[in-house]
Image: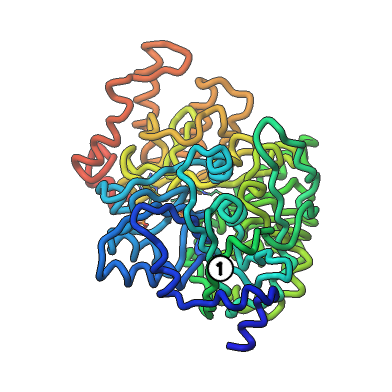
Amino acid sequence: MNGQLDRIRRESLKQKVVTAEEAASWIQDGMTLGLSGFTRAGDAKAIPEALVKRAQKESFKVNVFTGASLGHDIDKLFTEAGIVNKRLPFQADATMRKGINNGELLFVDHHLSNTSELIRGGVLPQVDIAVLEAVAIAEDGSIIPSTSIGNSLIFAEHAQSIIVEINVAHSEEWEGVHDIYDPGVLGDREPIPLKHPDERIGTYGIPVDPDKIIGIVLTEEYDSFSTIDQPDEETEVMAGHLLQFLRSEITAGRLTKELAPLQSGIGSQANAVLHGLLDSEFENLEVYSEVLQDSVFELIDAGKVKSASCTSITVTEERMDILRNNLSFYKEKIVMRPQEISNHPELIRRLGTISINTALEFDIYGNVNSTHVTGTKMMNGIGGSGDFARNARLAIFVTKSLAKKGAISSCVPFVSHVDHTEHDVDILVTEQGYADLRGLAPKERVELIINRCAHPSYRQELWAYYEEAALRGGHTPHILEKALSWHIRLSETGTMRESKEEVTQS
Ligand code: COA
């Protein structure tokens, strides 16, 4: 306990140490909570767990705002306890996903850079209590975050009160990784002074009025580890296509071997595709991303990546061990920022990122659906993919051409939900090949998308749709009454294929 108390460097705050149960008892029905946590990293742990226990005895509901998804099954436990009224801006838990799709709770799916603006502008309900994980509280009361920053700065600034969870499982050595910067209110804002991914423009800690800290809970629990699938044969082929494309950009004189700051989205596929850069000639790479997954650390170890900017670090257990044991080495290469800054459109455009995100499906003109299974069922959320795609130098979307053993084609006549319009999608990559859509009219895109990205077993049907649509004319030909017929067939028969036998053959 004494060693733990040393993490509270402001003497007057030491008396605010309470149990998680006591802190959780301050949370009232109808409140809005701002919890730290981004893709399982740096999440508040003890108080959410104590809140779930409280729900066994009394009934209440709260709004839960976070950076992104949480670890420790918190979203699952929250859903099972039935205590969430509204959740935003991102989640990735199967039970909560079901709850959202069954209407048990409300979910707001907005661009991750936008939560701060909506809170700062008073659009969202006031955050009553912010619960923030930290490695320490500094002498001036500022909060030193742990393995993510996410929305913790804006929560700390705008919440009525703050509870800090000091997690001693994280080393104090994390101090110095963070770069806390608030751009200020809209309409009265200077340009954000960041010109390179490795620059620092802010402070190490989150500045707060110490009087706002109403309680401190001491914890000792690791983050939940990443559960992504390792690269497989198909993702390796996809990575190969991406490398081929990047090489063609170098030949055309638009990129050098150092490429441009890289962003790679969450999930197994984006991680695997980035992993492919390990066996490439590219070097001195910079990363300007939202989450750092295993592949970025592999690239750092291989001497390929010289610096990486992020808002969270979410890695497998094995990778976290290496990171913990060599934190001083990695610390020199990593800067962690609030998600408003890691995902800021101004910076993404200025830095000219190469952004690689994952699609669930894309259509013959290049619209991308990343969030809604068959147009209605929420998967995880748009996350930061829209922040990056709209503003990147190169907006690349990757996905395997088939899902569910071939019952689903990722390439469809018309996406059943649009997250990234054809205007924001530059390159599509599947294990079949890549399509560079830049500067192409819709009719020019069709050939590339079908012939290079769709699975061969669906190409004939895609062409049949397009040829019939083309007879009707228009700039972007469609047969509106058939545009979603593949999704309708899927929900009625379990496959997008006209003949069921084809499913097992592919
Ligand atoms: N229709 C229905 N289901 C589909 C599908 C489609 N067209 N394409 C894929 N799926 C299913 C897969 O079968 C898999 O299902 P399972 O969990 O039952 O096995 C699931 O979707 C996830 O696919 P997976 O291949 O494991 O992909 P992933 O881990 O790379 O995740 C996304 C892909 C799209 C779900 C994920 O990247 C995401 O949520 N993206 C949106 C947010 C984002 O891009 N954030 C990054 C910004 S920095």
- Residue 120 in which image quadrant: top right
Q: Nearer the viewer, residue 21 or 442?
A: 21
Question: What x and y, as percent, mark residue 305?
Answer: 74, 60
Q: Is residue 433 visible?
A: no
Residue sticking out furthest to the bottom: 2
Query: Can residue 136 be seen in the rendering of this structure?
Result: yes
Q: Is residue 294 left or right of residue 48?
A: right
Left or right: 198 as drawn, with respect to 477: right
Q: Mark 1 and ligand 1: say if the CB distance to the nearest ligand atom is below 8 Å.
A: no
Q: Residues within 10 Å of mark 1 (few under 14, many from 20)?
A: many
> Is 247 or 368 nearer to us in this picture?
368
Q: For the point 70% across and 43% down, which residue is it?
A: 183
The disc labelled 1 sits on which kind of residue? Val
Residue that carries the numbered disc 1 in the rendered image: 164
Kindly identify the residue that appears in the image at 29 percent across and 47 percent down: 101
Quadrant assignment for the N terminus:
bottom right
Image position of 339 (left or right of 481): right
- Per the image, label 1 sits on a secondary structure element best described as strand
